[in-house]
Amino acid sequence: MYPLLDSIYAPTDLKKLSRGQLPQVAAEIRQRLLEVVAANGGHLASNLGSTELAIALHYLFDSPRDQIIWDVGHQAYPHKLLTGRHHQFHTIRQYQGLSGFCRREESPHDIFNAGHAGTSISAGLGIAEARDQQGQDFHVVSVIGDGALTAGMAWEALSNAGALRKNLIVILNDNDMSISPNVGAISQHLNRIITGQIYNSMRHEIERLLEQIPGVGKLVLKAAGRLEEAIKGILVPGRIFEDLGFRYIGPIDGHSLPALLDTLSNVKQLQGPLLVHIATKKGRGYDIAEADAVTYHGPSPFDIETGAFKPSSGPPKYTDIFARTLISLAQADARIVAITAAMASGTGLDKFAKVLPKRYFDTGIAEQHAVTFAAGMATQGMKPVCAIYSTFLQRAYDQVIHDVCLMNLPVTFALDRAGLVGEDGPTHHGIFDLTYLRPLPNMVIMAPKDENELQHLMKTALDYNGPAAIRFPRGAAEGVELDETIEAIPLGQGEVLRDGADLTIIALGAMVPPALRAAAAVQDEGIDAAVINPRFVKPIDDELIAQYARRTGAILTVEDHVGYGGFGSAVLEVLGNHALTGVSVLRHALPDDVIEHGAQGVLRRDYGLDEAGIADKIRQLYALRQRDLANTL
């Protein structure tokens, strides 16, 4: 089925093929991508677009001696197929299978781990500097997409690289799109470069003709060069890269293997920082993905022939409830605006944009700017809602502190994908937000137990005249009925969902439903467990927690977050502040470890965050409490 791809176990095998065989390799890679992603889900359109680039790089460079750094990993599936992982590729994004991103732990050809965009140039420059410091000699190639180029870090790296003058090749894979359609001046700039190819062709032809003039040709060419410099900035937008110290080459057709191979062969011989601009098409070779690259950027399993997704039933997604609620609240309050950092569909804000387009803003992959942009609007009486994945808000931590919390500005952070996200793995699990947000002054932190509570907590956040964060999980909600009227919940007020005398379970957010089921399951074993839904991590309902700590003498905290500095730590602080001694406490959280990828249900099972795992913790705490009581007699 894959006559050439089946024979490639390393880039050295690819190099044994003739140039004439490489188009067939590209065709087989695309077929393999479709076969596996259609079955597993994953990143499709961008990988279909980067196929020829991956082939050209591994055909010409000597990986892993020559170090190729792929930005993000959305475009690195072909790279994986060419570096010994074709026969395991069906396991990609599956539990204990291949990662959907580059992982140093997985292959020596994966030079740098990356799940957040905009890091490849910085990493590549660091590698190039280390190479030179150690007197080594190899090529460093950083591949970055045009979407990632909207990240400020990428431009910081370009500026530094131009100043250091290191031998570094940057490949700009320009497919005119990130996850959401590209926005802003940088996207427009790259479009002007693509449409300006006629100038490049004309320039080279004029240079060729001038050089043929006997005697004075070179002098005329030199003078023409000075004239060109005067007008180049106007006619050739690519000049911006040259002003940063890079030699600019392109744009090149990223689907023409002859053009890529010839260009990169020449580029390998050049010195200094080089930027090779290639133009590719997302979804290349699969008409359905080419026509709708947003939908097929990271699709769930689908039918290859029709593109139809496998039907899903059940409750709506938390993301959809968030979008619906925000639209409703914004229609009633003209001060509410919505902001995303290039994740319009992922956060549900694409729906908001259709209803209230003038109050919707996509900053591109620029979380830092998104937060301070929101802060600026908040100083003028607006109520910005920044919908940013929990893991991506980490990138704007200083802005959250400096530009929002210290000025106590009313910016609401909707932290989608909080907790275990599943197949995207370690770089995307939203398991640190409580630890990094809890210490911040003025910050209110909330976690709904279900979709109905989500809409009420959103109203709570927008009514609060300061910074607030609402964390909610990826995927389907609980399927509860939604109240027609959305009302704010008093700040810091938890609720008792189940009374009990033997011990108290305080479960946060998405952990409340399985905790309730677990409490019911152990009832027949003679364990009478109370269940509290805190709703607020900060301000925490310390009076309610202290009351039940005194009543039952045993506390079990449950959270889909790391233990260090998380919700369980907040409960321990409450017990300490109330000088409550003799209380048996068990914190149930994620360990201090890298949490791998896998389906959410599988990960929750393995880390004991499902009904069965929580029931086991209840039994442990009950036994601990009985032992503690016996020791006091």
Image: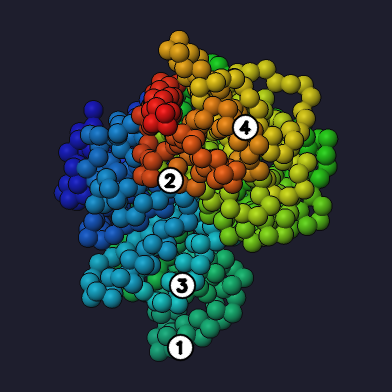
First of labels 4, 1 by sequence position: 1
Spatial separation of the CA atoms under disc 3 and disc 1: 35 Å
Disc 4 marks which amino acid? Gln
Q: Which residue is mark 1?
A: 219
Q: Nearer the viewer, residue 21 or 596?
A: 596
Q: Nearer the viewer, residue 630 or 388?
A: 630
Q: Residues within 10 Å of mark 1 (few under 14, many from 20)?
A: few
In front of the other: 569 or 480: 569
Secondary structure state at the residue bearing disc 2 = loop
How is the structure coloured here? rainbow
In terms of sequence position, does the residue under pointer 2 or pointer 3 come before the other? 3
Left or right of 188, for residue 616: left
Q: Which image quarter: residue 454?
A: top right
Question: Percent from the top left, x then y, of residue 237?
Answer: 57, 66
Q: CA distance from mark 2 to mark 4?
A: 39 Å
* Residue 522 vertical placement versus 493 (above, below): above
How far apart marks 4 and 3 lie (CA) works out to 57 Å
Q: Which residue is mark 2?
A: 427
What residue do we see at 67% from left, 17% from top? 481
Please name the residue that numbered disc 4 is placed on. 547
Q: Which residue is denoted by mark 3 in the rendering? A: 160
Q: CA distance from mark 2 to mark 3?
A: 26 Å
Task: State which mark lies toward you, 3 or 1.
Answer: 3
Q: Are marks 2 and 3 in contact (CB under 8 Å)?
A: no
